[in-house]
Amino acid sequence: MAKIFIDGEHGTTGLQIRTRLAARRDVELLSIPEAERRNAAMREDLLNSADIAILCLPDDASREAIGMLSGNNHVRVIDTSTAYRVDPAWAYGFAEMDKAQAAKIRDARFVANPGCYPTGAIGLIRPLRASGIIPDGYPVTVNAVSGYTGGGKQMIAQMEDASREDAITANHFLYGLNLKHKHVPEMTVHGMLDRAPVFSPSVGRFPQGMIVQVPLFLEDLKNGFTRESVHKALVAHYSGQDVVEVVGLEEMKSISRIDAEELAGQDTMKLFVFGSTGGDHVNLVAVLDNLGKGASGAAVQNMDIMLSA
Ligand SMILES: NC(=O)C1=CN([C@@H]2O[C@H](COP(=O)(O)OP(=O)(O)OC[C@H]3O[C@@H](n4cnc5c(N)ncnc54)[C@H](OP(=O)(O)O)[C@@H]3O)[C@@H](O)[C@H]2O)C=CC1
Ligand SMILES: CC(=O)N[C@@H](CCC(=O)OP(=O)(O)O)C(=O)O
């Protein structure tokens, strides 16, 4: 039975991974008491006792955990932080982004779990870059709204406890206003973009869920591409798996609103190509749970792929 240690198991992402693994009989969970969660000696011991360590920590603490494994050559790692997502020594843990990616994850020792927003953005952009439909130099924009659990324990407290000095009272707010959000490098590299996208994130007063939008001008894509052919390319890319669904054009006709919470509690992602037949523009839309396919669900999926080796 594989031994799994979730470093950060009492935080938002860690807790959701623990819940997903609690009923499983094929893995043994190594656990640290909540009061000892920052006890470095205990963490080091547990990290080195695991077959797979899942790091659910801030970036600095993730790097520290990797340091604790420096004398060890067998513990495999899934890191949910931003620390290693563009590090070429790490496999990027988005199995559906490329036909070869699941095998890379399966065989890797170090897997960087994708960010929540990049999962939506890369899911929409990469297939269209890989096939040349989005040409070099195209100015991509990514606009998104996340549930507030995306900000971890601190933002959850700020959104839920109005008596705090730092309580957030807004129902929906934009942030990342300097356009230097930590997810931009990851979207650029794994989205195969030659220009960094303009990324504008926001948070809404709901705990879990996410919408990521990438609008495109059809006349600036590879010649002759229409809403129908862009949709067909995404359908072809995502054939043969059941985690990422490209919603059918027929079904989209009856949709007049998109609910950011539609996939809350689920580990799948839905992609849409909105617009009209013969129109000049399309709006690519991804819907996911920031803590599902955007974090904890993806980490468990990656763990399963690694255990299938
Ligand atoms: N929330 C989300 O939707 C997503 C989160 N992620 C990533 O997952 C990681 C964890 O985020 P999240 O779960 O939201 O954050 P939380 O703040 O909810 O949880 C982090 C946990 O790590 C613990 N921790 C912090 N520093 C240390 C340390 N030095 N040593 C040991 N434990 C430590 C915290 O303990 P304490 O309570 O003492 O602070 C807390 O239990 C982050 O890197 C984040 O970017 C990725 C995708 C989505
Ligand atoms: C709403 C919110 O604050 N979201 C976080 C992103 C989610 C997260 O922390 O996860 P990553 O590891 O994927 O960065 C942020 O914008 O920093």
Image (cartoon, rainbow, N blue to C red):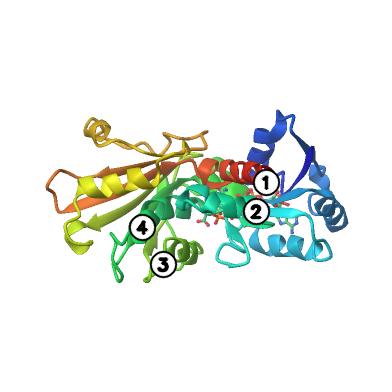
Dot 1 and dot 2 residues touching (CB under 8 Å): yes
Q: Residue at x 29, y 35 (%)?
A: 248
The alpha-carbon separation of the residues under discs 4 and 2 comes to 32 Å
Label 1 vs 4, first from the N-terminus: 4
Label 3 vs 2, first from the N-terminus: 2
Q: Between residue 104 and residue 165, name the one nearer to us.
A: 104
Given this view, does label 1 or label 4 mark the residue nearer the observer?
Answer: 1
Dot 3 corresponds to which residue? 179
Q: Residue at x 65, y 40 (%)?
A: 17
Quarter of the image that includes the N terminus: top right
Given this view, does label 1 or label 3 mark the residue nearer the observer?
Answer: 1
Q: Secondary structure at mark 3?
A: loop
Q: Secondary structure at mark 4?
A: strand
Amino acid on which the number 2 mark rests in the picture:
Asp
Dot 4 and dot 2 residues touching (CB under 8 Å): no
Dot 4 corresponds to which residue? 142
Label 4 vs 2, first from the N-terminus: 2
| Tag shown at residue 222 | none
- Tell me if residue 128 comes above or below residue 287 in the rendering: below
Q: Secondary structure at mark 1?
A: loop
Amino acid on which the number 1 mark rests in the picture:
Ala
Q: Where's residue 38, x and y in %?
A: 79, 54
Q: Secondary structure at mark 2?
A: helix
Amino acid on which the number 4 mark rests in the picture:
Val
Q: Where's residue 266, x and y in %?
A: 51, 34
Dot 1 corresponds to which residue? 309
The alpha-carbon separation of the residues under discs 4 and 3 comes to 11 Å
